[in-house]
Image (cartoon, grey):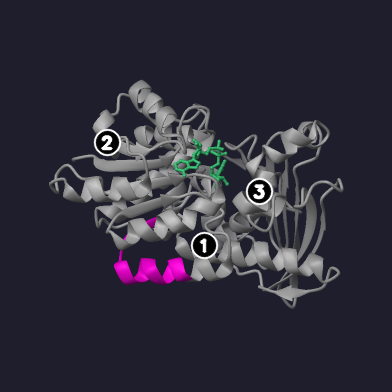
Amino acid sequence: MKKIRMGMIGGGIGAFIGDAHRRASRICNDFELVCGVFDANYERSKEFATMEGIDLSRCYESVDAMIEAELKLPDGERMQSVSIVTPNALHFPFATKLLRNGFHLVCEKPMTMTVAEAVELEELVAKTGLTFALTHTYTGYPMVRQMRDLVASGVLGTIQRIDAQYYQGWINSIIHGTESRITGVWRLDPKHAGASSCMGDIGVHAFNLIEYTTGLEIKEILSDLSSVKDDVSLDLDGTVLLRFGKNLKGVIRASQVCGGEENAITLAIYGSKASLKWAQENPNYLYMLSDTEPTRVFKPAHGYNEKLAEASHTMPSGHPEGIYEALANIYTGTAKSIRGQKFDPGEFPTVHDGVRGMKFIHSVVESNKKGNVWVSI
Ligand SMILES: NC(=O)c1ccc[n+]([C@@H]2O[C@H](COP(=O)([O-])OP(=O)(O)OC[C@H]3O[C@@H](n4cnc5c(N)ncnc54)[C@H](O)[C@@H]3O)[C@@H](O)[C@H]2O)c1
C-alpha cells in the first residue's frame, strides 16, 4: 500500500516531540515525511531538512507558503496529512488553515488556547469530513487499551473511585535558576502556553486518560493550584477533585515541581468487584487487584488480551512496548481513518477529546481563581 505523504510543522533541530512523531510514523510504516516548516527560523528549518533528507524545495518558509505550493503539486505528490508539533498557541491557526485547504491533521495537545477555538475546530472537522487525531500519546499503549476494554466489559463491577496522578520535577531547576531562564521557557509564558502550565501540559493527559479508559465524562471539578513562586504567572502544581455523578468521585494530582519525579503518570480505577492500576514508567504491566483473589498482571502480546490491546503490540511478548510504539499505534489508527478503512474508536483521540481537554483546563483555572469552588465542565 502507498505511504501517506506527511508534512510537519515544528519539530526542527532540538525540538522535543516532533522527533517522536517522525519515529512513530516510521514504526507504523504508513507515512512518509515529504515536506514541512520545521522551525520558526527558516535557515534552521532548511538545516533540519538537509539533515533529514527532505527535498529543500519542499522545506517552506511559512505555513501559507507550504499550503500554496503543495496545492499546486499533482495529486500523487501533494502532502495528504500534516502533523502540528509546535507550541500550543500555533495549533489553532495552523489547524484551521490546513483543514480549510483539505489536509488531514495530527495535532499535539493541548489542542487550542481557548474553549471557543476548540469548539470552532470541532465544527470545522465535522464540516470538512477530514481526519483529525489528537496525540494524547498514552492512549496508544497496549495496556492502556486493555484497561479501556476491561472496564467496558464490566469486570470491575461498579466503578467507585478514580485516581490519576502526573508528577514531573523538571521545572524545579528552571524556576530556581535565573530570571532569563523563566522567560525563555515557552511553557511558562501564557502567550505561547495558554491559561495553564501544569494542568495544560500534563494534567490534561491525566484527564484524557481517565475519560479514555472509562468512557465516563467528568461532570464537575474543584481545583487548588499553585505557581510555587511569585515571579511565575502560571500554575506549576495542583490538585483537582472530580465528580462523575452522585456516587463516583476521583482526583487528578499533577505537578511539575515534584523533585526527582520524571514522567510519573499513573491511573487507578477502583471497582466494586476488582480494580486496575497502571503506571507509564512501567507501561507493559497492568495490575488487576481484588479482595478475594491474588493480583493478576496483564502484559502485551498475549492472546488473553482484549481485541484492541492485542492488536496494539509491535513485537512478540517480552519485548517492551514503549512511548514510540504507543505514538505509532495512534498513527496506525489515523492512517486507517485517512484511507477510509475501518478502525476502532479507541485507536486515536479525536477533536472531541480536544474540546473536552480545553474545557477541563479552563474549568480548573476558573475554579482556582474563584477561590476553589465546584465548576461544571
Ligand atoms: N503528546 C505528548 O506526550 C507531548 C509531549 C511533549 C510535548 N507535547 C506538545 O507538543 C507541542 C510541542 O512541544 P515541544 O516540547 O516539542 O516543543 P519544542 O519547543 O521542543 O519544539 C517546538 C518546535 O516548534 C517550532 N516552531 C515554533 N514556532 C514555529 C512556527 N511559527 N513555524 C514552524 N515551527 C515553529 C520550533 O522551532 C521547534 O522546532 C506542544 O503543544 C506540547 O504541549 C506533547
Label ID, residue 58: 2
Instruction: Name the residue that disc number 1 marks.
Output: 353
Residue at left 24%, top 53%? Answer: 339
Instruction: Name the residue that disc number 3 marks.
Output: 202
Label ID, residue 133: none
Q: CA distance from mark 3 to mark 2?
A: 33 Å
Asked if the residue at tag 2 contacts the one at tag 3, i.e. Cβ–Cβ closer than 8 Å, the answer is no
Q: CA distance from mark 1 to mark 2?
A: 32 Å
Query: Quarter of the image containing the C terminus?
Result: bottom right
| Label 2: few (<14), some (14–19) or many (≥20) C-alpha neighbours in 10 Å | some
Indicate the secondary structure of the residue bearing disc 2.
helix
Instruction: Residue 38 in the image: state x and y as whole percent.
Output: 41, 36
The range drawn in magenta is 120-132
Answer yes or no: is residue 78 visible. Answer: yes
Answer yes or no: is residue 307 visible. Answer: no
Residue at left 57%, top 60%? Answer: 113
First of labels 3, 2 by sequence position:
2
User: Which secondary structure type mostly characterizes the magenta part of the structure?
Assistant: helix
Q: Residue furthest top?
A: 51
First of labels 3, 1 by sequence position:
3
Which amino acid type is marked by label 1? Asp
Q: CA distance from mark 3 to mark 1?
A: 15 Å
**Which dot, 3 or 2, sits closer to the camera?**
2
Q: Is residue 295 left or right of residue 259?
A: left
Indicate the secondary structure of the residue bearing disc 3.
helix
- Residue 129 in the magenta stretch? The answer is yes
Q: Between residues 69 and 194, which one lies in front from this camera angle? A: 69
Determine whether 365 is above or below 134 in the image: below
| Label 1: few (<14), some (14–19) or many (≥20) C-alpha neighbours in 10 Å | many
Instruction: Residue 120 in the image: state x and y as whole percent.
Output: 46, 70
